[in-house]
Image: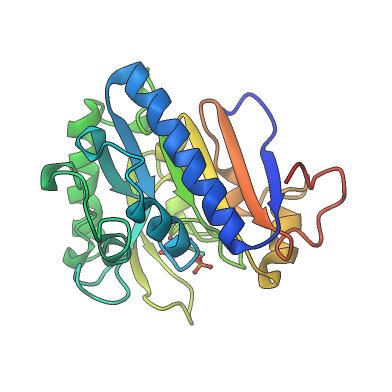
Amino acid sequence: MTPSSPDVRVLDDPSKVARAAADAIASAFVRAVERTGRFALVLAGGSSPRLVYELLGATRRLDWSRVHVFWGDERCVPPDDPASNYRLAASTLFAHDGPPTHHLHRIPAEHGPAEGSARYDEELATFFGSPTPGAMREPAFDLVLLGMGDDGHTASLFPGGPELTSSAWCAPATAPPGASVAERVTLTLPAIATAVEVVFIVTGGAKRAIVARALSSAAADVPAARATARERVHWLLDRAAAADLPPAKAGSS
Ligand code: 6PG
């Protein structure tokens, strides 16, 4: 359980949010390698992370041989589909260089929600040596990068979804009508909670209301607000997304 309240930083614009997220990932990499010799990084999907991935992909801040990459969720499409979260990372973060293939722990969501989730659950249980995230003594992931939808979902943990109560590593999920792809596989809240750190990147005025709700005391029904970490949950916001936050919440820039 996260011992303290979330750390909230408000930056001028999405490019500064991306730089701050890239810095957070690079710092977490150094700490993780010192602690365990490797860095277990969970990538977010959607559009917000693109700038972060392009930044990190263009620099050589991470020793890819030490990095194991996982995904917070995946749409049930082939890995080369434009809607694939794997393809987003492959075409940006790993455009120039990247971890060895066997370090890329892609969610096999093309097999459908149930089969894809069962296969990924087995892969995570084998990799971390634990049948469920709740049985982990040590942290599993070092940093989980997350976005948030304007309904408060994160990864593919949707308001009122059965995936919110799963105790497994991952679960099948269904996005609400209107989402780009309905069928999904998602990490669960207990899996996210095995992370040393969680970093949210949320930008744009369309999310100002849900950001204010997610960071308020009335956040119980906001899936993103239920994400916890062993050490700290960080929110990296741009000014537009933070516009409805009370001054006391809108931390340092
Ligand atoms: C996905 C993401 C999802 C995303 C939010 C925010 O697969 O869609 O994992 O949780 O982070 O929907 O999406 P944007 O960054 O596009 O606003």
Give the answer, above or below, for where 97 lies relative to 74. above
Residue 133 pos. (x, y %): 36, 31
Q: Residue at x 67, y 37 (%)?
A: 7
Q: Residue at x 46, y 62 (%)?
A: 51
Q: Is residue 115 left or right of residue 2?
A: left
Residue 62 pos. (x, y %): 32, 39
Most extreme residue toward the front, as rendered?
59
Give the answer, above or below, for where 184 lies relative to 245. below
Most extreme residue toward the right, as rendered?
247
Res 245 → quadrant: bottom right
Q: Residue at x 73, y 66 (%)?
A: 240
The quadrant the N terminus occupies is top right
Residue 210 pos. (x, y %): 69, 62
Q: Is residue 160 left or right of residue 82?
A: right
Give the answer, above or below, for where 164 lies relative to 239. above
Give the answer, above or below, for where 159 lies relative to 7. below
Please name whichever residue, 215 or 145, is drawn nearer the observer in this view of the structure.
145
Most extreme residue toward the bottom, as rendered?
178
Q: Residue at x 43, y 38 (%)?
A: 26
Please name whichever residue, 117 or 77, is drawn nearer the observer in this view of the structure.
77
Residue 190 shows in the view = no
Residue 170 pos. (x, y %): 33, 47
Please name whichever residue, 186 or 20, is drawn nearer the observer in this view of the structure.
20
Residue 239 shows in the view = yes
Q: Is residue 203 left or right of residue 165?
A: right
